[in-house]
Every structure is written in C-alpha cells, then in structure tokens.
Image (spheres, rainbow, N blue to C red):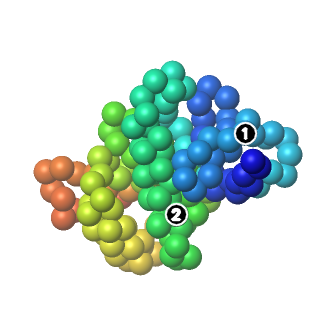
C-alpha cells in the first residue's frame, strides 16, 4: 500500500524530516531541494524522546495545529519556527525573526493568546513592528498583559 503524504512542516529530530498534518514523520528532508520551500520547522524535540514516548507524536500534532491556526490570518507574520522548550512554545517569525513567547498552552489558552497578539499587532505602528524583537504572551501572573521588546532607534 502506497500512502501519499504532503509535508506541512519540517521537524528537527537530530536530522531534519518532513512531517504531515497528522504528525507523521515520513522522510528525511533534502534541504537543498525544492521540497522544503518555506515550510516552518519544529525544533526542541529530542529524537530519542520522540521515539521512546508515544505521546510526543500528540505534542507534535498539537504544535502543527497551533502553527496552522496562527497562519490562517494573513495579517499575522508568517512563522518560520516553532520551538518547544521548558518555557513552553515559542514562535519565530519569518520576517524580522520576532520571538513570540506563547508559554505552556491548553487548548482554550491559544485563542485568548491569539486575540491578545492580534490586538497588540494592530496597535503597533509600522516602525514599532520593525523594531520588535520579542512579544511576551506567556505571563502566568498577569495573563491580561502583553509585553513587547523593541530594539532602540537605529
């Protein structure tokens, strides 16, 4: 039986692999070929942990779902990387490499954090967006606040 899979992202598991929407890691990526395109990359998952813990596939699927929901709105900057760490999930934008800290999420948290991001992003002027380096959406003590780190004037 041949199953055709369409890549939606890359995942770094020691080597870089293509992954489909179901979280199936199916082929080592040829980074020099056109098969990679502008796919976002998922980082921060160790290969040994991914292989040993079946729940990591669920985690990978959840991250892919978050990236897909993020990218549904064309106003939001495109994601180049989603990183899983001890701080939770951090997105990096393709343009400007803005770091967006989402933190540890439950399913219902993500929509709230998306709405907060959208409000802040709409409020920032073009020059402020260009100066932004970090957007903190991950405060556990002040969940109603967002902090934006800006580079100084150039």
- Where residue 85 sits: x, y (%)? 39, 35
- Where residue 144 sits: x, y (%)? 18, 64
Q: Residue at x 31, y 48 (%)?
A: 103
Give the vertical position of 13 relative to 135 (above or below). Answer: above
Residue 87 or residue 154, whichever sits in front: 87
Q: Is residue 16 left or right of residue 49?
A: right
Give the vertical position of 126 relative to 21 (above or below). Answer: below
Disc 2 to disc 1, how far (Cα)? 21 Å
State yes or no: discs 2 and 1 in contact (Cβ < 8 Å): no
Residue 44 or residue 29, whichever sits in front: 29
Q: Mark 1 — residue?
A: 27
Residue 46 or residue 147, whichever sits in front: 46
- Where residue 79 sits: x, y (%)? 56, 57
Does residue 99 appear in this view?
no
Give the vertical position of 106 relative to 27 (above or below). Answer: below
**Mark 1 secondary-structure assignment:** strand
> Which mark, by number, is residue 36?
none
> Which mark, by number, is residue 68?
2
Q: Residue at x 62, y 52 (%)?
A: 20
């Amino acid at each position: 039986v041949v199953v055709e899979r369409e890549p939606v992202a890359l995942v770094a598991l020691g080597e870089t692999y293509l992954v489909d929407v179901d979280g199936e890691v199916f082929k080592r990526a040829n980074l020099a070929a056109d098969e990679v395109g502008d796919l976002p990359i998922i980082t921060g998952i160790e290969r040994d942990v991914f292989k040993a813990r079946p729940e990591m596939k669920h985690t990978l699927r959840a991250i892919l779902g978050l990236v897909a929901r993020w990218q549904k709105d064309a106003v939001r900057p495109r994601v180049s990387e989603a990183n899983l760490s001890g701080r939770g999930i951090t997105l990096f934008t393709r343009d400007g490499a803005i770091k967006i800290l989402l933190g540890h999420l439950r399913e219902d948290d993500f929509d709230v954090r998306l709405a907060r991001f959208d409000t802040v992003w709409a409020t920032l002027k073009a020059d402020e967006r260009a100066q932004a380096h970090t957007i903190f959406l991950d405060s556990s003590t002040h969940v109603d606040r967002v902090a934006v780190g800006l580079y100084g004037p150039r």
